[in-house]
Image: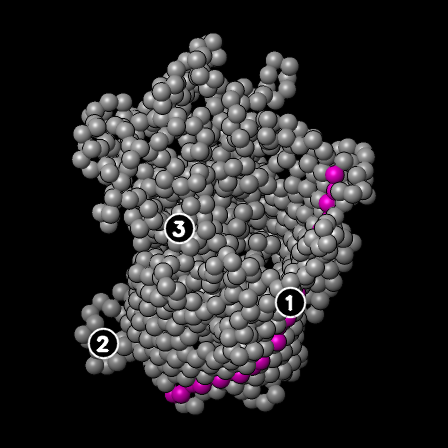
Amino acid sequence: MKKTVLFLFLTILCWNTFAQGHSVNGVVTSAEDGLPMPFASVVLKGTTIGTSTDIDGNFTIEADEDAIIVFSMVGFAAEEVKVGNQTTINVILTVDNMGLDEVVVIGYGVQKKSSVTGSISSIKAEDIQRMPIQRAEQALQGQVSGVQVTSNSGQPGAGLSVNIRGIGTTGNSQPLYIIDGNPVSDISYLSSTDIGSMEVLKDASASAIYGARGANGVVIITTKQGTQGAAKVSYDGYYGIQNAWRQMDLLNAQDYAMIINESLLNSGKDMTSADWIQDSEIAGIGSGTDWQNEIFRKNAPIQSHTLSLNGGSEKFLYSTALSYFSQDGIVSEDKSEYERINFRVKGDYTSYNKKLKVGTSMVYSHYTSQGIDPNSVYNSPLARAINIDPITTVKDANGEFSWPIRNMQEIVNPVAGMYYLNDEYKTDKIVGNLYAEYKVMDHVKVKTSLGIDYAYQWHDVYTPVYALSTITQNSKTKVSKTMNNWYSTNWETTINYHNTFGEHELDVIAGTTAMTSNYENLSGSGSELIIDGLDYAYIDNVGNIESKSAGGTYSSNSLLSLFGRANYSFKDRYMASVTVRRDGSSRFGPNDRYAIFPSVSTGWIMSEEDFLKEKLGPVSYLKLRVSWGQNGNENIGDFRYLSSIANNHNYSFNAGTVVNGSSPSKIANPDLKWETSEQTDIGLDLRLGSNFYMNLDYYDKKTKDLLIDAPIPGYVGNSAPTVNGGTVQNKGFEALLGYNGNYNDFSYGGTLNFSTNKNEMTKINNDEGIIYGDVNVGPSGMKNLTIAKEGEPIGYFWGWETAGIYQNQAEISANGAHQPNAAPGDLIYVDQNNDGVMDDADRINLGDPHPDFTVGLNLNFAYKNFDLSMFWYGVVGNQIVDATRRYDLPNANYQTSILKRWTGEGSSNSTPRVSWTDGNNNNGNFSDYMVEDADYLRLKNLQIGYTLPRSVLDKLHIEKFRIYVSGDNLLTFTEYSGLEPEIGNSDNVFYTGIDQGIYPQARVYTIGANITF
């Protein structure tokens, strides 16, 4: 591996020596104040060859005499200079209306920002580098209006839930990711330091070019590419420490004993009960064991290092990078961690006649992860730490792990549970793309590309012998190994025509896509290892031959598409775009396998009209956008329209003869068709003067023919068919406000983006008008916590409303007929239909896990060589279910809020009495007693940096040297009582906002550096 990397680096360096032309240098300054302009773009016109100015505005670039250099920077008008025989070119940039010549990436091409008619948001590399993020998706949070990014958990390597303009389906609602033109299954492998830009296609007209897979929005990622000039070596890295940002307020040993004994008394028991906590059990232990302190790790390390090489000539550009990232979890010393090594290479070659262009982009990633269950009330260490009694010690007098003082089922010593956990994933992944583009005649180009996405994963589990309680035990060593293999190919060919006719500009593209995806699984397991130990956990070391088992699965799908788009512009003032795509997917039945997805959009730069210019006052730029379009969704799994055959169905014949048979496992549906999203968008882009800009959008998105599994009676005997069963609507408003300015050596700027979204199920194709989420937690009353229902949002919390606490028997006698087991101090449940019975007919909407409003604030300041940035993110209007306590276990610990419980008439009207038997089911029925507001405002990042002055850098022969200190999650303002108010779920929307002991995000302090040689 080391020899291969060295060979690639040396080869690239050799290629760089073929640079043509001569060296041109100079300084770029601002017309407003005469100061140098760092990080301005310097690009050879008509190419992607370029560089950027350093901190003092200096640049160097290789160029031919007939070349034209374009100097640009956001907020300033671009300048073009013919090179000729000049070796020094100094340029002064003047303030521009809006950086309208800036190019953004769209599907299968690029377009001037001023010509874009759809709703597209961009994030550049410099924006991403302001935060030491762990996953690429984090760069979207709070940076793009209309995009909600929610962490699934704080565990290292954990995913994020990304929703563009609301939840559009009851299935997988994650967007489509395109990396360097290649659709990928996920982007967890990608290092944030490899990203050159991210474009988010939010409306249907922008994403319609991706048709079948664009219903949930599209995120286009372009990795960094080479720039013309001598080879440059850069280092970007940081090292940090992580800690829990908060702990829950739980009862200590003394208060716990008091509450447990009181609950026994309230249930007619006394100190003779076996569950009574005697004084001798808590004597001399003080507050007891703080289990959160025991499982949370102090100063868990996190680090990232990237070494990159970039350069090129007029003909050849290259960019390579080698990166390493590791993160230890804040829970457990060595059972929750993630490590990733990446190697990226990207090259583009243009022939001497500039007709042929070929290139490649490839990322290899190797990552390993170990983890605990991040959100489970049954088995996660956090849930165990929250529920276990504080009287039990970590270890007993003999140095062995202690058992809980009373039986608590799965709630066992959390430290012991982590000690015996051995669960590891190892993954090798390659994502690559190879393309060739040829200019067949003036204005016409043909391009073909082949992309691959390959991943090979091992999952190893070793379970030793242990005994943690009377029911949580393992008497035999066990081992299991699973091999997962994903591989897909994507072949695309396009033809593009682009020409200008006087004041008319036309850009037309047509193409075809053929994509195949495959998945293969092989697993084996066994028990009773001959030689015990993690190092010997292999199946051929299994002593119990009869325990050995093996299995495997295979699935595949394919997609065939035709698409076309025409972009037209007149006078750079009136724009229109039309797109159509036809997709065929093997995932749908033969009756509806193909579908067509059209879109149309228009744009009008109103500020260019003579009759409006004088009336706009301070508005220097005003553009109106209108779009309509359709997208599809096929993300349902393979062969769902068929009645697949399942084996291992044993049946007994002839008085005991067991025969292994096969039978259909699912009801077929040959009419299964596409889930279709239809969206209308109205947008407005404006700028006031030269410093302030604003983007506004209103959207209305309707998704019909939802892909769901239809409920069927149990006597049918087969799994439910997948059907098209509903319609959902998302509509909302988005705004982005930005300001940039400077005063002498002080520059400042910021963006504020906020979004609203209203989600509603408008139709469900069954008699009930309900889709059950099958979210079941804890005791028998806690079933179907979330549902989708006509007139309500997807995945809302469905339970019983309470109206305070019964203060005396008279209140129960007067109003409690529907609660026959109620006693003073119990919750009052509202009988919604006044039928005297408490049942599902009385359950209502208790809250929505998805916010009504999200906001992101980014502020940036610089004074001479110092810079400061901060990022705030907040959500308003959503709720969380606090399901952290095992309500079915009467001896589970409580939060300290229980100290304000009802103890007599008038003592409390919000927290019920404690009861061992809980006859009224205060803790077993899912009610608003368990739902809390989840609004929060969080300082996601604060960073302070210093760049060495040019006088020092020249002496060190270094182009750039910046050091910084940074903090993540430094402040969080929330009323939620749990460990973490940010709880997403990218796999199942119905589990969003359910806190079962969530692994919290960490507070992180880092120190880092950005160095270019």
User: Which label's residue is closer to the chain start, 1 or 3?
Assistant: 1
Picture coordinates of residue 49 (x, y %)?
Answer: 57, 70
Q: Where is residue 500 drawn, in percent x and y? A: 45, 87
**Residue 482 left/right relative to 504:** right
Q: Give yes or no for contact between labels 1 and 2 (Cβ–Cβ under 8 Å).
A: no
Q: Is residue 513 magenta?
A: yes
The mark that comes first in sequence, 1 or 2, is 1
Rounded to the nearest whole Å, what is the CA distance between mark 1 and mark 2?
58 Å
- Kindly report which numbered mark, 1 or 2, lies closer to the viewer in this rendering: 1
Front in this rendered view, residue 600 or 399: 399
Residue linked to disc 3: 786
Rate crowding at label 1 as few (under 14), some (14 to 19) or many (20 or more) other CA atoms within 10 Å: some
Quadrant housing residue 299: top right
Point 61% across, 76% down: residue: 514
Residue 315: assigned label:
none
Gap in angstroms between the C-alphas marked 2 and 3: 53 Å
- Label 1 – label 3 distance at C-alpha: 32 Å
Label 2: element kind: helix
723, 190: nearer the viewer: 723
| Rendered view: 295 above or below 716 | above
Q: Is residue 414 left or right of residue 474?
A: left
Q: Secondary structure at mark 1?
A: strand
Q: Residue at x 35, y 35 (%)?
A: 921
Amino acid type shown at disc 1 = Ser
Which of label 2 and label 3 is nearer to you?
A: 3
* Vertical placement of residue 494 versus 855, above or below: below
Q: Depth check: 1011 or 92 in front?
A: 1011
Q: Which residues are magenta?
A: 503-527
Disc 1, disc 3: CB below 8 Å? Answer: no
Question: According to the image, label 1 marks what residue?
Answer: 556
Q: Looking at numbered disc 2 in the image, what kind of residue is underneath it?
A: Lys
